[in-house]
Image: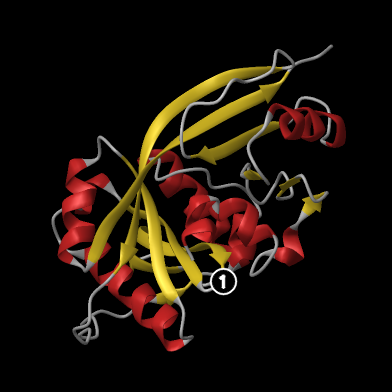
C-alpha cells in the first residue's frame, strides 16, 4: 500500500486509470487534453529520458516525487512546488450534505474551465471531465463550486478539482462537496486521498476537519520538453 501512494500517478495509470495510459512500462502519461500528469516507474534519469523519447514535441508534464531529483537537460523545469498528500482516516459515519448537487457533464465544461481558471485548484483541461464523478453547485446558471475525482490508484481514489468562486467562500460548499465525494468513494470500498499545496493552510485545516490525515510531503515538478 505504501508503494502505491509513494507513486500514485504511475500506479493509477496501471490500475484504475489504465484506460487513459500512454507510454510504456517505464514512463506513462495521460492524453494531453485530459491531464498533464505523468508517472515514472522509479523516477530515474533513464525514465525521464524515455519519457522524452516517447512523448509528443513540446510536451508539458507534472510529476509527483518523494524527494528532489535531477532533471535532464532536455527538460526545462517550469514549476516546482511542495505538496502534501493526505489520506482519509475517519471511522465516523458521514452526514449527507443538505445541498443539491448537479452531476457535471460535457455541456458544463466551459463553466468548469472558467471556475478552475479563476480559482486554480490544479490543472483542469478541456477533456479532464473524462475522469468522471464531477459534481457542482449552481447559483442560477453560474457554477459556483465543484469537486471531482482524478487518480484511481487502486484501492485509492483521489478527490480533486475542489474549488469555490471567491464570492461564495465561507458558505461550506467545499466541505459539502468533498463529503459527498468521500461517501461515493467509500461506497466503492475504496480509500479517499488527495494532494494539496503545502502552503495552503486553509485547505489543509478543512481536509483535517473532514477526516483526512497528512501522510507525506512530496514534490511536484512541472517540466517542459525542450526543442533539440
How are the colours assigned in the image? Answer: secondary structure
Residue sitting at 24 percent across and 45 percent down? Answer: 166
Indicate left or right for 114 with 7 as reference.
left
Residue 44 is at least partly visible in this image: yes
Residue sitting at 57 percent across and 19 percent down? Answer: 77
Image position, residue 149 (x, y; %)? 49, 65
Closer to the camera in the image, 181 or 151: 151
In this rendering, the answer to whether 165 lies above or below 120 is below
Image position, residue 157 (x, y; %)? 48, 68
Image quadrant in which you'd find residue 159: bottom left
Indicate left or right for 113 with 97 as reference.
right
Image position, residue 126 (x, y; %)? 64, 50
Residue sitting at 40 percent across and 45 percent down? Answer: 121
Image position, residue 16 (x, y; %)? 64, 70
Neighbor class of circle 1 (other Cα within 10 Å; few <14, some 14-19, many 20+) is some
* Residue behind mark 1: 154
Closer to the camera in the image, 215 or 23: 215
Residue sitting at 28 percent across and 74 percent down? Answer: 179
Amino acid at each position: 500500500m505504501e508503494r502505491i501512494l509513494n507513486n500514485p500517478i504511475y500506479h493509477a495509470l496501471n490500475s484504475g486509470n489504465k484506460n487513459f495510459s500512454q507510454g510504456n512500462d517505464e514512463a506513462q502519461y495521460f492524453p494531453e487534453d485530459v491531464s498533464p500528469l505523468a508517472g515514472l516507474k522509479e523516477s530515474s534519469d533513464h525514465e525521464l529520458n524515455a519519457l522524452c523519447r516517447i512523448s509528443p514535441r513540446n510536451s508539458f508534464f507534472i510529476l509527483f516525487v518523494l524527494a528532489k531529483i535531477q532533471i535532464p537537460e532536455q527538460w526545462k523545469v517550469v514549476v516546482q512546488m511542495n505538496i502534501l498528500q493526505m489520506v482519509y482516516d475517519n471511522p465516523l459515519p458521514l452526514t449527507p450534505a443538505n445541498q443539491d448537487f448537479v452531476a457535471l457533464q460535457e455541456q458544463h465544461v466551459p463553466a468548469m474551465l472558467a471556475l478552475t481558471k479563476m480559482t486554480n485548484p490544479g490543472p483542469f483541461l478541456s477533456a479532464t471531465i473524462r475522469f468522471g464523478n464531477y459534481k457542482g453547485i449552481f447559483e442560477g446558471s453560474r457554477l459556483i463550486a465543484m469537486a471531482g475525482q482524478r487518480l484511481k490508484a487502486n484501492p485509492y481514489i483521489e478527490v480533486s478539482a475542489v474549488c469555490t468562486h471567491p464570492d461564495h467562500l465561507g458558505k461550506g460548499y467545499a466541505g459539502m462537496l468533498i463529503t459527498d465525494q468521500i461517501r461515493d468513494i467509500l461506497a466503492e470500498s475504496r480509500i479517499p486521498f488527495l494532494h494539496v499545496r503545502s502552503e495552503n493552510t486553509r485547505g489543509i485545516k478543512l481536509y483535517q476537519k473532514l477526516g483526512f490525515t497528512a501522510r507525506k510531503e512530496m514534490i511536484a515538478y512541472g517540466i517542459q520538453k525542450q526543442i533539440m
